[in-house]
Amino acid sequence: MVMEIFLRLAVVFFAAFCSAAGSKHVYHTPERRSTGASFGATYFVDGQYGNDSNAGTLQAPFLTLTKARDTIRSLKSSLGGSLPAGGVLVQVRGRDYPFLSAPFTLTQQDSGTAQSPIVYQSYPGDAPAHLLAGAYVTPNMYTPVTDQSVLNLIGNGTSVVQVNLKQLGILTYGDLATGSLGNCNNNKLELFYPNRVMVLARYPNISPSGVWQFMLTGKVLDTQKSFVYNSSRISQWKNTSTLWLHGFWSYDWADNYVKVVSVNTTLSAFVINNVTTPPLYGFLSSARYYALNILEELDAVNEYYVDRGSGILYIYSPPQDKGCVSVGSSVISMTGVSYVSFVGFTMDCSRGTAVSASSAVNVTFSNCTIGSNGGSSLSISGVSGGNQLSLTPGFNTLKDSSIHDWSRWKRTYQPGLSWSGVGNSFINNTIYNGPHSGILGKGNDCIFSGNVLRDLCYEVTDSGAFYSGRSWISGGNIVANNVFMNIITTEKVYLGSPSVQAIYLDDQMSGFEVINNTFINCYAGTFIGGGRSNVVTGNVYVNCTTAVHIDNRGLTWQPTYCSTGGMFSQQLQSVNYTQPPWSLHYPQLVNITTDHPCVPCYNLISGNIYCRVKQFIDFNSTIATVQWLANIFNNTQDCSVLNPPTSLTTASSASSPTTASSTSSPTTASSASSPTTASSASSPTTASSASGSTTESSASSPTTSSSASSPTTASSASSPTTSSSASSPTTSSSASSPTTASSASSPTTASSASSPTTASSASSPTTESSASSPTTESSASSPTTASSASSPTTTESSASSPTTSSSASSPTTASSASSSTTENSASSPTTENSASSSTSESSTSNPLTGAYNPTTVSSNLSSGTREECAWLVSVVMGVCLSFIMTAVFNGL
């Protein structure tokens, strides 16, 4: 008896230990500790009451971050190049920390290690520490305009005030610059106020609703030098010596600035300095533009003008609030840094890119707000974030942060987040209010999960909120569980259609996985521009013109990229793609030059839901499946996602801006070569709803009837709620499944809330058949199941199978975030995959059903709760194992 009790206890605690160890995925995030007690050394910085001659203690803090950095350097030197065990924490009080002459600069010598990271953190309980590259302008600095020459230009001076910048010590104001495609040579001073977008005095003015207004070029007299204007107001301007024009001169996705040399009032024409400021791609008629930097047009709220000679800042009717004048080029500059974190900061008011990190490894930005800057907000660029040739991951992370109001000068190709590298994570961020792309770049094996991208691309055409293009070797990237909202052009365009995409895989970009995202009010949801081997599954599209686009540009107007010796061949050779590690990590690339090289082949479009969408696809599905070898099936029109029944039980919400990823563990549960898969060769059946919704399923996918040998069976017309026969029950998830999407540490999910193999009803319509895809596993958002025609939200139930989700041979299992279906058993209240109980709903509200706050990104389940659940499950498993062991013991 004693031996029996001992065995039971031993098994219970052994199982608990194993389960808990497995549930805690260690991710090399240097800010893993939250209290100074865990660190080997802690310093304090107070921008108001500190002094750099102090010791850096809580009672005697430093004044500047630079002093803290230099102290860490000295500490490392005194320890022979090492840091104390546990690392160094710098706690920064909630003050202002201006970087006017130079950014806060970190280099390789400022790195930590995995065992001794360096963490810069806003002091807990304080307001976020404010790192800025500017100086404040306050209402007590405003004085009335008295210069009569100025009053003669602006007319009524009572609404205009002035600030003497020289008296503030600001002596450089920067020059306006032309800018080229993707290049912003901006160093000009800007003015920012909280919640106000300030612009240089311009004509025409921005509308009261915030929409930019433009003029159109008239007859072009010289494509590089001159064109006719169509406004008589321009001829009345008295002083045009400072006048610039900003326009989209040939394409509505490419802008730049030109300096006006003279205004020919006889011809009503501008003459441009085409030597130093040539128009990008030349002038075309009917191109939109506006005039700026002209004092006599200082006539509207939110406008300002800088006299670069006198150093006087003029502001039209400024708010009685504190403004910021940008002085420095950036806030933080990092090169070759590793194991460094910034936690809880606000970073803004820079003339260029606010934060840059190049050649970085294990660098983390967490709970930060970055915005109000002239260029990009955050750039992780160069050979950053790992090595592409060796496919060594960088483990850099941006999480739980907000990026907003960037690209203030150059309006295109200055994204909120610029990225490259290998194995980096961008988790649970909100990126909003940008005229062009929110996220732009390319790399390998990077994760974009739980982010909200909204109000983007509103000023351009042919652009993407998430943009990546021109590569066969940038594979393994996952865009999962994100929300895209209001990705539409709101400003009238004239040189192209208003086509902007939420996710834009441009110019044959290949190897992306777009999984379980929600698209609301987007012109186009997912755009595949000639690329191959892209996966688009489990997504929800609402109020979109087009849900999914694929074209064959490699066979038509862009064959040089994919032909022998072209751009893609050169890329492949540069990474030795036929040799390890590339041949092992991306085996599909080994024969790519002979395997339909210019064909947009092997794209998978399945298990998606759409509602109020003009067209789910805008290409010929027969051509796509037969000639392009695409798999297109099980895509369903179902508007129940807009208002799912309250009785519906789901484990996570695809429309939630954050789903199955923990803020403390931005890693993915996916394998290196294929993080998530949406179709399974072992699943012979696909589902379509009989409730009147439109379903796309594979024409060659047989719907099997109930059979003892079949793992899934079809429901008959008279019994639509029977998923499988008593002799062939389906199970919740396979123990051999290599990928489970309900792990708390995984930001991606792949399988459906409904059974991955659900049968279609006799009356269910099927369209968009794919001859090349006989098998499918339902995606995370698929609402279709084998239920009766009378129910828009369908269920599968089986008396012998209380919980059904995926077959034993399915490679991926998970519950969907957006699925409107549940699998119910008459004998069991349990629904869905039990593993998904650890997947959290992160949004405060489902944007499809209620009030939505996109800036709130939080997890409903803390890591502690997940660990408690893991222990509970493990204990139960241990008890079961103990009884088995006891039975064996007694038998012996």
Image (cartoon, rainbow, N blue to C red):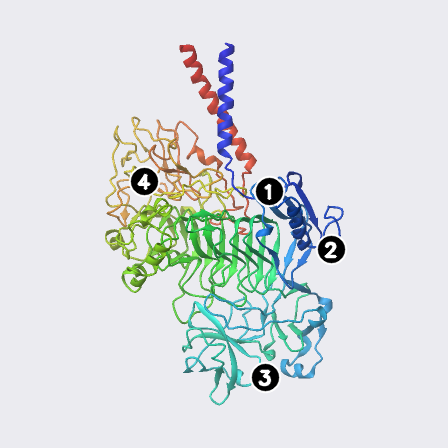
Sequence-first tag of 4 and 1: 1
User: Label 2's element?
Assistant: loop
Pair 2/4: label in front = 2
Mark 3 highlights which residue?
239
**Which of the numbered marks, if any, corresponds to residue 48?**
2
**Which of the numbered marks, if any, corresponds to residue 283?**
none
Spatial CA span between label 2 and label 4: 61 Å
Amino acid, disc 2: Gln
Dot 4 and dot 3 residues touching (CB under 8 Å): no
In the image, is residue 676 above or below residue 865? below
Dot 4 and dot 1 residues touching (CB under 8 Å): no
Is residue 562 visible in the rendered image? The answer is yes
Residue at (43% x, 10% y) in the render: 890
**Which of the numbered marks, if any, corresponds to residue 116?**
1
Sequence-first tag of 2 and 4: 2
Amino acid, disc 1: Ser
Sequence-first tag of 3 and 1: 1
